[in-house]
Image: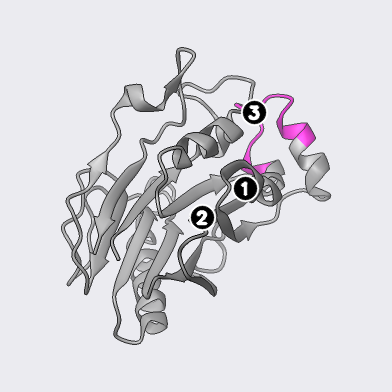
C-alpha cells in the first residue's frame, strides 16, 4: 500500500508575517483537503489538540512537548487575543500525526529527544499500514546548534527500535538544512523533510506559496512538504 505522507510546521496558527488572528483550523483543514494518508504536524498549541480530529476528520495521535498554561482553554483564550505575539510560552507546544481512518494505525508512544535544561522536544511514532512513521520538531540551530543533530539521531534510534527492522519514515521540522540520515532516502533542500528507509520514497515535493495562501495571507512560515511512500 502506497502512502502519501505530508509534514507541516503550523507556526502556532500564524500567518507569515504574523497577524493577531489564529488560522489554525484553516491550516488543518487545508492539510487534509486532498485526502493524504498521513499528516505530521508540528507547532500545535496544546489547547487545539482536542479539536484535531473534529477539524481534520482523521485519527489524531498527539504528542505534547510542553503543556503551557493551565487550564488549556484559558491558555487558548489568552493566546487568541494576539496570536502573533502570544504563542508557546502560554499555549504550550505539541506535535501530532493524523492518519486516514481507512488505514490500520497504532500509537507507538513518544520519547524526549532534547537534553535536560533546554526546551523540551519529543519524537513520536505511529505504525501505519506496517510502516513506522516518526514525527519530530528538532530544536532551532540558532538557539542550540550543538543539540539539533543529536535530537535527530535520537529520533532515528527511537523510530528504528520501534520498527524492529521494518520500514521507517521520519518526518518533521529537522531545523537543519538538507539534513538526511544514513540509509534513508534523499532529503529535500530545506529543513522540513519526509525521508524513508526500507521502503520506496518519491522525491520530496514542497508546496508552492500560492497553495497555502488564503484571502491574501500566507499560512505559516513553513511550506508543507510531502512524499509518496511504498
Q: Can you identify the residue that label 2 sits on?
A: 98
Pick out the residue farthest to the bottom.
164
Residue 53 place in picture, x, y as percent: 63, 50
Q: Is residue 33 left or right of residue 187?
A: right
Q: Residues within 10 Å of mark 3 (few under 14, many from 20)?
A: many
Q: Can you identify the residue that label 3 sits on?
A: 83
Q: Which mark is residue 91?
A: none
Residue 52 place in picture, x, y as percent: 62, 48
Is residue 78 covered in magenta? Answer: yes
Residue 133 versus residue 75: which sits nearer the camera?
A: 133
Identify the mark nearer the N-term, 3 or 1. 1
- Which contiguous range is marked in magenta? 77-89
- Label 2's element? strand
- Residues marked 2 and 1 touching at CB (< 8 Å): yes
Residue 148 place in picture, x, y as percent: 37, 59
Q: Which mark is residue 52?
A: 1
Q: Work out which quarter of the rendered image holds the C terminus and state it.
A: bottom left
Q: CA distance from mark 3 to mark 1?
A: 18 Å
Amino acid at each position: 500500500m502506497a502512502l502519501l505522507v505530508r509534514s507541516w510546521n503550523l507556526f502556532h496558527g500564524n500567518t507569515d508575517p504574523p497577524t493577531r488572528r489564529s488560522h489554525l483550523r484553516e491550516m488543518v483543514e487545508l492539510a487534509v483537503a486532498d485526502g493524504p494518508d498521513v499528516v505530521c504536524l508540528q507547532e500545535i498549541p496544546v489547547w487545539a489538540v482536542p479539536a484535531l480530529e473534529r477539524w481534520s476528520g482523521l485519527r489524531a495521535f498527539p504528542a505534547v512537548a510542553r503543556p503551557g498554561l493551565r487550564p488549556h482553554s484559558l491558555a487558548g483564550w489568552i493566546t487568541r487575543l494576539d496570536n502573533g505575539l502570544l504563542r508557546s510560552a502560554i499555549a504550550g507546544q505539541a506535535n501530532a500525526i493524523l492518519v486516514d481512518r481507512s488505514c490500520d494505525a497504532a500509537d507507538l508512544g513518544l520519547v524526549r529527544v532534547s537534553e535536560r535544561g533546554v526546551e523540551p522536544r519529543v519524537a513520536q511514532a505511529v505504525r501505519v499500514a506496517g510502516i513506522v512513521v516518526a514525527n519530530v520538531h528538532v530544536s532551532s540551530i540558532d538557539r542550540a546548534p550543538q543539540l539539533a543533530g543529536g535530537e535527530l539521531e535520537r529520533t532515528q534510534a527511537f523510530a528504528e527500535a520501534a520498527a524492529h527492522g521494518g520500514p521507517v519514515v521520519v518526518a518533521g521540522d529537522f531545523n537543519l538544512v538538507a539534513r538526511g540520515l544514513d540509509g534513508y532516502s534523499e532529503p529535500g533542500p530545506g529543513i522540513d523533510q519526509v525521508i524513508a528507509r526500507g521502503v520506496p520514497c518519491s522525491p520530496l515535493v514542497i508546496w508552492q506559496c500560492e497553495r497555502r495562501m488564503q484571502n491574501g495571507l500566507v499560512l505559516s512560515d513553513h511550506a508543507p512538504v510531502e512524499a509518496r511512500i511504498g
